[in-house]
Amino acid sequence: MNIVVSGGQGGIGKAVVRELSKGRRRRIFSLDIAGGRSKGNVEVRRIDLTNHEETAALIGNLCKKYGQIGVLINCVGYYGVGDCRTFSAEEWRKNLSVNAEAPALLAVECSKHMPNGGKIINVTSAAAYLGSRDIGYSAAKAALAGATKSLALNLACRGIDVLNVAPGIVDTQMSRRMPEKRRLNHVKKLLSGRSGKPKEIASIIRYLVEADTTYLRGSTIHINGGEYLQ
């Protein structure tokens, strides 16, 4: 099975790649602007996922060489810290470009090369549902959550499952961009009493990759330490 992981060199993305690479007969393509070293059944491709023409060409070439894409996991993300005092048009555009536009268009592109039974798993955020002081980030993640529902409606007829995983605060380099005092106050309010670990998110994603998720089409899996109770 060919699996594409966008943002595969980031905190959650790297944990997802590591977790999925344990499976047999899997080839993992880690797509990330940071690049990295390929090893074993993991092939790292350095690419700016906001360049849609270049991304579409890469996906096409991978499929010509290796065959159809079985699973896409969108972990690509950018945490733009900015409240009403510091927020700018540039931050707005970057948040939407990286957190919403890039993964949504990658999902559309990969879906063209997926068989019946394929899966798309988008990683959004609890901020998409709870809101955040960081205007661009929460808005962009909410946009991706909405796109996930639309993709599910479009692709169910082809037997492709589209799902949304929405983590709360996870201990990664990206989340540590949040001001320290604010981050600690955030964690204190969680029922878990701590931030999530990338491996915990990756374990859930691995389960979704391996399980029959037909009845979960269009669903959101919330993993947030009790921050968002439904």
Image (spheres, grey):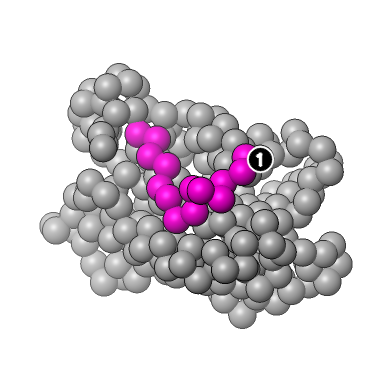
State the residue at coordinates (37%, 67%). Answer: 96
State the residue at coordinates (34%, 71%). Answer: 93
Instruction: Determine the image quadrant of residue 31.
Output: bottom right
State the residue at coordinates (44%, 61%). Answer: 148
Please state which of residues 230 and 128 is positioned toward the viewer in this rendering. 230
Amino acid of disc 1: Glu
- In this image, 143 relative to 198: left or right? left
Instruction: Determine the image quadrant of residue 70.
Output: bottom right
Q: Magenta segment: does it hold 169?
A: no
Q: Is residue 151 in view?
A: yes
Q: Is residue 55 in view?
A: no
Magenta span: 211-224
Please state which of residues 77 and 126 is positioned toward the viewer in this rendering. 126
- In this image, 199 relative to 164: left or right? right
**Rendered location of residue 207, percent (x, y):** 59, 36
**Rendered location of residue 213, percent (x, y):** 56, 46
How many callouts does the rendering have? 1
Q: Is residue 177 above or below residue 141?
A: above
**Rendered location of residue 17, percent (x, y):** 66, 42
Element type at marker 1? helix
- In this image, 114 relative to 154: left or right? right
Q: Which residue is mark 1?
A: 210
Q: Is residue 149 above or below residue 125?
A: below
- In this image, 143 relative to 156: left or right? left
Instruction: Determine the image quadrant of residue 65.
Output: bottom right
Q: Magenta segment: does it hold 217?
A: yes
